[in-house]
Amino acid sequence: MSAGAFAIGGQLIKGFASFSAGQSNAKALREQARQERIAGTAQEAQIREISRKAIGDQLAAQGASGFQVGTGSALDALHESAVNAAIDALRVRREAALRAGNYDQQASRAATASWFDLASGLIGAGATAKGMKTDWAAARSGQSSSIYAPAGMGGNKTTDGSGMTGALDRLSNAAWAY
């Protein structure tokens, strides 16, 4: 197997591995968002349950101390307790929704990045294959020294014998192509 084939394979493997890792991360983040919503709902329900019990205890204490239950200042105290409990429950719900939304956004970014990683790997493999084809054609015509050209298939003949002139020319031309 030639060096070019290894380079193409490496680009493809890198792209698919990055895609798979990104999709796994996105899945884990979506699950974390789901768990945050479940925990927020459970905590909200717990606050409401504790509130109902506290209001029941207040009613019982008012009745036991001789107050007329559910009237006047006793009613005001019950109302204030109910409002405070509702505010606490809504705060917990909001905080859980914010945390879950943050995880959802992270999941979305991870999934999007994984698609770009896959595209990058595919484009890199395609560019490597194109470079191989160009080098192969140049090597066959005796115009290039290439790592992709088979032994004895070409090479720029240089006066110093390094064979690097063709490679440097290709790098220079590639830089200007972009």
Image: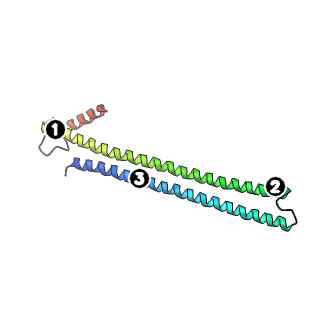
Quadrant of the drawing holding the C terminus: top left
Which residue corresponds to the image point at 71% horizontal and 61% vertical from the top-left? 51
Question: Which picture quadrant has residue 155?
Answer: top left
> Does label 1 or label 3 sit earlier along the sequence?
3
Mark identifier at residue 23: 3
Mark 3 is on which residue type?
A: Gln
**Secondary element type, mark 1:** helix
- Mark 1 lies on residue: 137
Q: Is residue 76 left or right of residue 21?
A: right
**Secondary element type, mark 2:** helix
Which residue corresponds to the image point at 38% horizontal and 46% vertical from the top-left? 115
The x and y percentages for residue 19 are 37, 50
- For discs 3 and 2, the disc positioned in front in the rendered view: 2
Whether label 1 touches label 3, CB < 8 Å: no
Whether label 3 touches label 2, CB < 8 Å: no
Q: Is residue 143 left or right of residue 7?
A: left
